[in-house]
Structures are given as C-alpha cells and as structure tokens.
Image: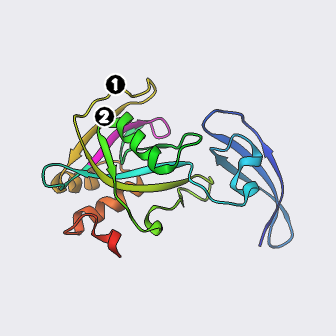
Amino acid sequence: MGIIRKIEQLTHNPFLNFYTLETTKKTGKPGQYYVASRAKTAEDLEISRGETRPDGVTMYVLGGEQKDKVLLIRQFRWAVGQYVYEFPAGIIEPGENYIEGAVREVYEETGLRMTPIEADPMFTRAYYMTDGMTDECCAMVYGYAEGDMKDQHLEDSEEIEAFWADREEVRRILKEERVAANCALHLMHFLHDEEPFGFLKA
C-alpha cells in the first residue's frame, strides 16, 4: 500500500480546495497525487481525520396524488457549462445533521416540504462521489414532498428549475439529457420497480 508523507494545501476557497500529496508508491518510488476537497484545511481532509462523514446530502423524493412522480431539478453546472438533471442536493451546514440538511435543501431549491422516511443505514450512509479525485461524501435521504414549487429561496449563483417527472419523462431524460450519475442510477430503479421505494426493504 502507498504511503502519504506530506499534504500541501494549494488553495483557500470557501467551497472547494486543492491539495498536493507527496507519496511513496507501493514500489517504494516517490510520487505526487492531487486531491480536490470541500475541506477548508489539510487537517480536515478525510486523510487527516481518519473518519468518513457526509459533506452533503442528496434527496430522492416522490410526490403527486399517487406518489408516482419523482422530484427532479434541472441545474446549470459551471463545470460542464450545461444544464444537468439531478436530484435536489446540497452541502450540510455546521451543526446540522444530514436529515435536517435534506429537508432544508428541498425547501430552498423547490419550495416543497419534505417528509423523510426511515431506511436502513446502508441506503443512507455517506458514500464517495468521485474518489479518484476527491474525498467528498454524500448521504442519501428518501421521502415524500408536497406543496407549491417556488424558487424565491435560491441563491443568485443557482440556476435551478424544479419539476415532477413521471416514468415517461424519466425515460426520455435518461435517453436524451445530461444526468448526474447518482440520480441516473436511482431513476433506473424508479423505472424498473413497481414500488419506487421497494428496494429500501432489501
């Protein structure tokens, strides 16, 4: 196994930072690796903490009269310069647990009131997003939402359109649009499973 000998912080940004790792490879040769992280300091990297905790939370939300529609957002993402279809998601604030963060983020991004449902921790615990380049982890929260969609709580940097999608629209989106990976995998369950949250009983 490789060894991390030194961590150097290269940026000091509010939401994302860049670090260089000086390493010893499994062959004994020196090397470098580059890590992007939401950690504000090297001490707060997972490498330094030694524990996994969620930086953010993603919400798989159903609604409609028959609870047969899924809540999606279409958001402009600077990293790709395009709109991407996603689930509502966001960063967990200091002192907030991920379920509280989920309810808050759904309201801020859509104006809807979310009611989370209980699920086995294996479905909700923090998992890595893109571990080849970042230590970012996200928890998952499942639930239902109701109310009228509103966008007055969005930040001026957010370009988000929220909407309910039925199976026909989900099928079109998966075939034709840019979709976040985590969202796409759950939408495949939504299309396949007779009971959308049925897999949570596994």
Above or below for 202 versus 79: below
Q: Magenta stretch: residue 75 in it?
A: yes
Near-viewer residue (46 or 53): 53
**Crowding at label 2, few (<14), some or many (≥20) Cα neighbours within 10 Å?**
many
Q: Amino acid at mark 2?
A: Gly
CB atoms of marks 1 and 2 within 8 Å: yes
Q: Give left or right: position of 117 versus 133.
A: left
Which residue is most to the left? Answer: 65
Q: Magenta stretch: residue 116 in it?
A: no
Q: Give left or right: position of 189 versus 138.
A: left
Q: Quadrant of the N terminus?
A: bottom right
Residue position for label 2: 111
Q: Which mark is residue 50?
A: none
The residue at 29%/63% (across/down) is 188
Q: Of helix, strand and loop, which one carries label 2?
A: loop
- Colour scheme: rainbow
Q: Which mark is residue 152?
A: 1
Near-viewer residue (36 or 56): 56
The residue at 17%/52% (across/down) is 166
The residue at 13%/55% (across/down) is 66
Provide the residue span drawn in magenta: 71-81
Q: Amino acid at mark 1?
A: Gln
Near-viewer residue (27 or 133): 133
**Crowding at label 1, few (<14), some or many (≥20) Cα neighbours within 10 Å?**
few
Disc on the earlier residue, 1 or 2: 2
Q: Of helix, strand and loop, which one carries label 1?
A: loop
Q: Quadrant of the C terminus?
A: bottom left
Above or below for 45 versus 24: above
Q: Give left or right: position of 110 versus 136.
A: left
Residue 183: image x %, image y %? 37, 55
Residue 199: image x %, image y %? 32, 71
